[in-house]
Image (cartoon, helix red, strand yellow):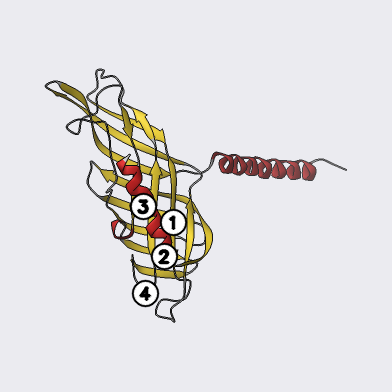
Amino acid sequence: MRSTLVRSLALFVFVVFARSASAGTINLSGGSIDIPGVTGGTANLVGDRGFTFNGFVDPGNFGFAPCILFTCPTGAPISLDLFALGQDVPGSATLDGISYPTVPAEQPVDVSLLLNIEGEFTAPPHGSEDTITLVEPVTFTGQFVHTPNVPGGPPTNAVREALVANGAIATTTLTFFDFPGHPGWEVENVEYNVTPEPSSLLLLGSGLVGLVGRRVYRRRNRTCPG
């Protein structure tokens, strides 16, 4: 409950003080966020309109509750939620041919990034393996706030762009620890990956099949007399 309240307040402050003049959309096509244990990790994202982000993520609201002593008992829900913005997501970005070497940055070049990932899975029973890897779907959204003018130009209102990922998964590595009275799984690493949308893959496959069929049709017409 407290984590949800903190997240909501942070999002409200981010939206209000970004001085957003309009809203757009950036469709993420790939990239990953790698979080080793409960420490900060790296973020590398790519999308349309030439969008890229390369930097660091401090997972301030990254929790595994109701884990005890950093250990999640069998059958317990393990949260994969990640929420980070502003100073928690430093790095560099590009969009629409403009480079933003410092993220976040203040006036006159307002630029900042927000990442919001939601997901959950259940701690599995302990078997013969003490280390396992699980893959779970997650919801990946965010915002990129920037000034559309070339950095160093006259101050303008910032634009708030929505980061949209049509597909995302979390690959989680768990290690089993038999603590006295509290046996369970410890989260060693979580990597979030933006994946191609299934419909996009289907369209790509259909296009390739159509291309091959067209070439076969042309070859047959060339070889067949009259």
Task: State the image coordinates of residue 215 (x, y, percent, origin top left).
Answer: 70, 45
From this viewpoint, is residue 107 visible?
Answer: yes
Task: State the image coordinates of residue 224 (x, y, percent, origin top left).
Answer: 81, 40
| Mark 3–mark 4 distance (CA, rounded to whole Å) | 23 Å
The one nearer the camera, 201 or 220, is 201
Residue contact between numbered discs 2 and 3, judged by CB atoms under 8 Å: no
Q: Earlier in the sequence, mark 3 or mark 4?
A: 3
From this viewpoint, is residue 44 visible?
Answer: no
| Mark 2–mark 3 distance (CA, rounded to whole Å) | 14 Å
- Pick out the residue farthest to the left: 180
Camera-side mark, 1 or 3: 3
Name the residue that disc number 2 marks.
18
Disc 3 element: helix
* The image quarter in which residue 113 lies: bottom left
Q: Tell me the kind of residue under disc 3.
A: Leu
Task: State the image coordinates of residue 202 (x, y, percent, origin top left).
Answer: 60, 39
| Mark 4–mark 2 distance (CA, rounded to whole Å) | 10 Å
Name the residue that disc number 1 marks.
143
Residue contact between numbered discs 2 and 1, judged by CB atoms under 8 Å: yes
Q: Is residue 16 left or right of residue 72?
A: right
Residue 86: which numbered mark, if any? Answer: none
The one nearer the camera, 62 or 47, is 62
- Pick out the residue farthest to the right: 226
Disc 4 element: loop
Q: Tell me the kind of residue under disc 4.
A: Gln
Disc 1 element: strand
The answer to whether 143 is drawn above or below residue 108 in the figure is above
Q: How many C-alpha atoms fall within 10 Å of the one at disc 1: few (<14), some, or many (≥20)?
A: many
Camera-side mark, 2 or 1: 2
Name the residue that disc number 4 marks.
107
Residue 9: which numbered mark, if any? Answer: 3
